[in-house]
Structures are given as C-alpha cells and as structure tokens.
Image: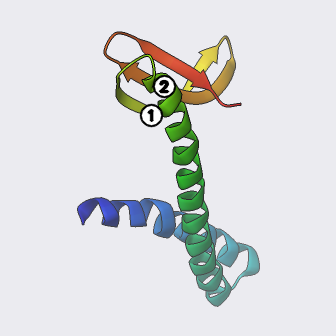
Amino acid sequence: MKFFQSTLFQMHIQPGIFFGLGMGLLNNSFVIGVFNGLFFGIFWGLAMRAFGKRRRKKAQALIGQISKDHTVVLDAAATLFVGKEGIGGWLFLTEDSLIFKPHT
C-alpha cells in the first residue's frame, strides 16, 4: 500500500500540482489552475502507466531471447553513455555476465 501511495504521489499528484500552479499563474486564475492541475495529473499518470506497461512488454521479449543462453537474475531500463550520447535500452544481469540491449 505504501508503494501505491508513493507512486500515486510521484506520477499523478506531484506533476499535477506543478502544472496547475503554472497554469494558474499564467491565467491569473486559481480555478483554472486547479482544473488544469487535476486534469494534467490524471492524464500524465495514465500515460506513464501505459508507457511502463509497453516498455515492460518489450523487455519480456528480450528476456525470452536472452534466457535461451543465460539465466537472467535481474533486469531494468538503462542508459548507456558513449561519450556525450546516451543510448536507451535494457540491462540484464545474468549469473555470469552483464548484457545491454539498446532499443530498436
């Protein structure tokens, strides 16, 4: 339950508060700020949840490929920096190696 409350605050309420404050100040209206903050908070949270599920689904396909040759102990989203350029992908910790697979 504590994880859910923390996630709810980080993904819905916190962005909604900042967006609502900004919109309220821009429009000189508290009501517009509250309405925009609520709408944005809900929309942002749902969008991030959908993005996370989509990303996890892609990772499951990669886990299936890697599991043929290795035993995956842990996996997570990661960014590999090559110089100043960041390459997004998925990092796998196996029993004997560390494997990075970039997004395709």
Question: Which residue type carries mark 2?
Answer: Leu
Q: Which residue is mark 2?
A: 91
Q: Earlier in the sequence, mark 2 or mark 1?
A: 1
Question: Which residue type carries mark 1?
Answer: Ala
Q: Exactly how many numbered labels are in the figure?
A: 2
Label 1 Cα crowd, 10 Å radius (few <14 / some 14-19 / many 20+):
few
Q: Residue at x 69, y 74 (%)?
A: 23
Q: Residue at x 53, y 60 (%)?
A: 49
| Whether residue 61 is visible | yes
Q: Which residue is mark 1?
A: 76
**SS at mark 1 in the image:** strand
Q: Position of residue 101 (x, y in %)?
A: 58, 23
Observer-nearest residue: 95 or 39?
Answer: 95
Q: Position of residue 93 (x, y in %)?
A: 38, 21
Q: Residue at x 62, y 68 (%)?
A: 19
Q: Position of residue 85 (x, y in %)?
A: 70, 19
Q: Quadrant of the C terminus?
A: top right
Observer-nearest residue: 88 or 75?
Answer: 75
